[in-house]
Amino acid sequence: MRIPVMSVPLMCLGFASGTVLADRVAIDLRGGGRIVGELLSEKADALFLDLGHDVIRLPKDQILKRSAGTDAPAQTTEPRGVAEDTIGGFYRTGGVEGQSVKQLVDQFGEGVISIDTPSGKGSGFILNEDGHAITNHHVIAGETRISATLYIKNANGGLQRVRVEDVEILAMNPLMDLALIRLPKRSDVTYKPCHLSVDELSAGDGVFAIGNPLGLERSVSQGIVSTRNRNFDGLVYIQTDAAINPGNSGGPLFNLKGEVVGVTNMKATAGDNLGFAIPTRYVKDFLRNRDAFGYDKTNPNAGYRYLDAPRRLKPRDASGSTGKPAAR
């Protein structure tokens, strides 16, 4: 559920009618986020916090936990995703309200990876600290050697490229164009997961994509949801005007809370600003049933194909009869 956080001008807070405080507090929200700031006022139904660049109102029924004093870290926000999936918290959900695209890219961008194969380059994103990641089926289909490049922040605030070899394919679904891979554990690398969305999108919602269009690493493009229900071949896609190009395939499409709402996988070549992404609900279904799509590296024909339905031996005429005499 979306947390109804509302920005309020200072002159409208009406502090005189509530308890006025100046302590630093950390608020854990039921939607999975954490907000840290100066507590300006506490009323019967809400808290008012100063984030330094804005003042927000937090309804008390959306507050899960409240910490004060030294329990509150110095940063203004901290992602606190909620583990989902009964098999070991395989992925996380939940994002952060009230941040700019620049802040969200800085916070969640380390979870976006580049996928390299002998025949090309694509994108992907990390699901958990064990190195599981999502990309498109068409990015790695038919490949036997896959590597990934991570972009990790260094002490100077820049990004350091770390290449990880021997990426393993775990599951593939060619119908949905999704693949589950696993990056091997390394002592010098900590995998930073992206969080999946729990909210439904609407046309006009802001989104942004991170990927490697045409091999240009770590490119960010921003736009809106043009429509959330575009049908192609029986599957529903998110249509967006954020720039999507070859190389973006498999990368995440984020909402303005830093949650992954889709996996970018195609664009319309005959027009501009017509990009498409696989909705997160398909990704969750694929992950919950990943054993059904397990990849066997010893089988060169790993995957599946549909069999034709059996045909009748003798066609029926217009009356429904097969031409045989009726049984007596």
Image: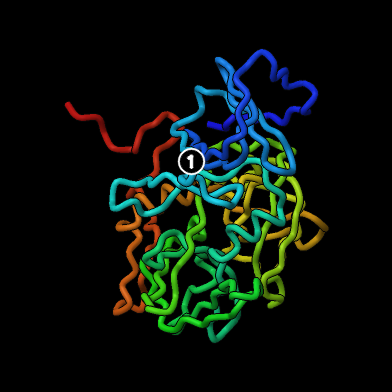
Q: Is residue 183 above or below residue 128?
A: below
Q: Quadrant of residue 14?
A: top right
User: What's the residue at 57%, 32% (across, down)?
Assistant: 2
- Residue 197 location (% of width, % of height): 53, 44
Outermost residue on the bottom side: it is 118
Position of 67 with respect to 122 (left or right) is left
User: What's the residue at 62%, 33% (across, down)?
Assistant: 22
Q: Nearer the viewer, residue 196 or 314?
A: 196
Quadrant, the C terminus: top left
Position of 314 with respect to 213 (left or right) is left
User: What's the residue at 35%, 50% (across, down)?
Assistant: 288
- Residue 261 location (% of width, % of height): 58, 48
Q: Quadrant of residue 166?
A: bottom left
Q: Secondary structure at mark 1?
A: loop
Q: Is residue 233 visible?
A: no
Outermost residue on the left side: it is 328
Q: Is residue 63 visible?
A: yes
Position of 180 with respect to 24 (left or right) is left
User: What's the residue at 82%, 58% (across, down)?
Assistant: 271
Position of 101 with respect to 186 (left or right) is right
Q: Nearer the viewer, residue 308 or 23?
A: 23
Q: Amino acid at mark 1?
A: Gly
- Residue 64 location (% of width, % of height): 44, 32
Looking at the picture, the colour scheme in use is: rainbow
Query: How many residues crowd mark 1 within 10 Å: few (<14), some (14–19), many (20+)?
Result: many
| Residue at image mark 1 | 32
Q: Is residue 184 above or below residue 20?
A: below
- Residue 315 location (% of width, % of height): 39, 44
How many numbered marks appear? 1
